[in-house]
Amino acid sequence: MLDLKGYEWALAEGAWVTVQVALLSLLFAVILGMLGALAKLSPYRWAKAIATIYTTVIRGIPDLVLMMLIFFGGQMLLNDSLYRINEWFNEYFTSSDPTHEWTAYLPDYIEISPFVAGVLTIGFIFGAYMAETFRGAILAVDKGELEAGKAYGMSSFKSFHRILLPQMIRHALPGFGNNWLVLLKTTALVSIIGLDDMVRKGSLAAGATQMPFTFYMTIAVIFLLFTTLSTSALKWAERRFSIHTR
Amino acid sequence: MDFSILFESWDLYLDGFITTVWMVAVALVVGLIIAIPVGIARNSKNPIIYFPAWAYIYFFRGTPLLIQLYLVYYGLSQLIEVQGTLWQEAWFCALFVFILNTAAYTSEIIRGAINSLPKGEIEAAKAYGMSTPQAFRRIILPSAMRRALPAYSNEVIFMVHGSAVAGIVTIVDLTGAARIVNSRYYAPFESYLFAGMCYMVLTFTIIWGFKKLEQRWLQHLRPIV
């Protein structure tokens, strides 16, 4: 039988980290996607422009490169600007009071954890894909129903959650499911920026035991399990949300 | 921020760009050749034929490309003697994995396209007395491949983006070049941003190319305005 040389728990812990990263970034992606879709459909030119630039740029760059850009580049950019702001403050105070000592008014070094960077990056990337999915789903909802909602005197929030949301879920589900499956597989990349997820735990175990095939195969099978579970859950959801159209 | 480092390392990026383009191109061409029989086999009613195709597609679509690459690049040495063979080379392992990966996705696209073909086209081929291979070659495949074009363009872009993992296993593709530039100058923002822009140019060129192809080959399916 499969012998993991006592690394079972390490892998299970890593799998839990992977699930957490995936679910949190999904949440972030859905929020960003909804905002992006509403911005794309809004009458404001600038909102449309920002959303279009966002979705276009994100879909043009590989997720791995974006992740490194945000994790390594973003960290540097953040700390550089923090340092500049501190320096500016200090120069300002020293000019009026020469005895002023250098103080860090803002924290001069913030370390972004790989977990946060991973969740933010993956969420940010898939927000762009979700925005496209949601935009299509919103457009698929009958305009007359929204107008009817308005005619009944519903506020825009009420008509959003009573009429638009329940109906767009049905149209958005297939695209949403695809995005989720791709997102799930993308989480494997967070191991590269140093997060102790399932892939990294597996790599460490593979190195220590000299059994790389066994461990990478185990991880592959766990991913298969995740995708299989997701597919059946999505099928169930699609059936549920399309009950009245059958 | 100092973008002058890009002038000093443009040749590295150019090398990376060329590596990315040729690896993706070879993977796509070979993958497509494999995908056609696999897609047809997946449609078969005989379990001995469709089950292996199904299992292959299921595995490669259900696991991350990075894991597949690790499995071949690091994992194979556990099973076979890789010393002195091509399996020792990172580029060979990456190419092998890219081919199998894109073939799995593409065969699913081809299968879908074959299944969504209007029944009349196939019936007409049969009525003309064509044998099954003849019908495939003359009617089904040409028509299905055209219809698969929009979905396939997505797969091509996924492959371009997915190929970035090659940079992790020592290959100097665009991502690998950015990693080297970053470690040389410690300028993560500039180095990765530039690589990202190169990918973006590549992506949009491909999208534009497929738009042109669709205009040409899907002309007859467009609604008459």
Image (cartoon, rainbow, N blue to C red):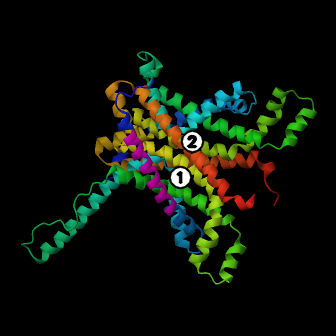
Residue B169 on image: x %, y %: 41, 33
Label 1 marks a residue whose chain is: A
Name the secondary structure under disc 1: helix
Name the secondary structure under disc 2: helix
Q: CA distance from mark 2 to mark 1?
A: 26 Å
Is residue A11 depicted above or below B49 in this figure?
below
Point out the stretch of residues depicted in magenta.
A12-31
The residue nearer to you, when weighing B191 against B150, is B150
Quadrant containing the C terminus of chain B in the rendered view = bottom right
> Is A194 left, or right, of B101 in this rendering?
left
Q: Amino acid at mark 1?
A: Arg
Q: Nearer the viewer, mark 2 or mark 1?
A: 2
The residue drawn where x is 64% and y is 27% is: B52
Please identify the quarter of the rendering in which residue B54 is found.
top right
Is residue A64 depicted above or below B83 in this figure?
below
Q: Is residue A28 magenta?
A: yes
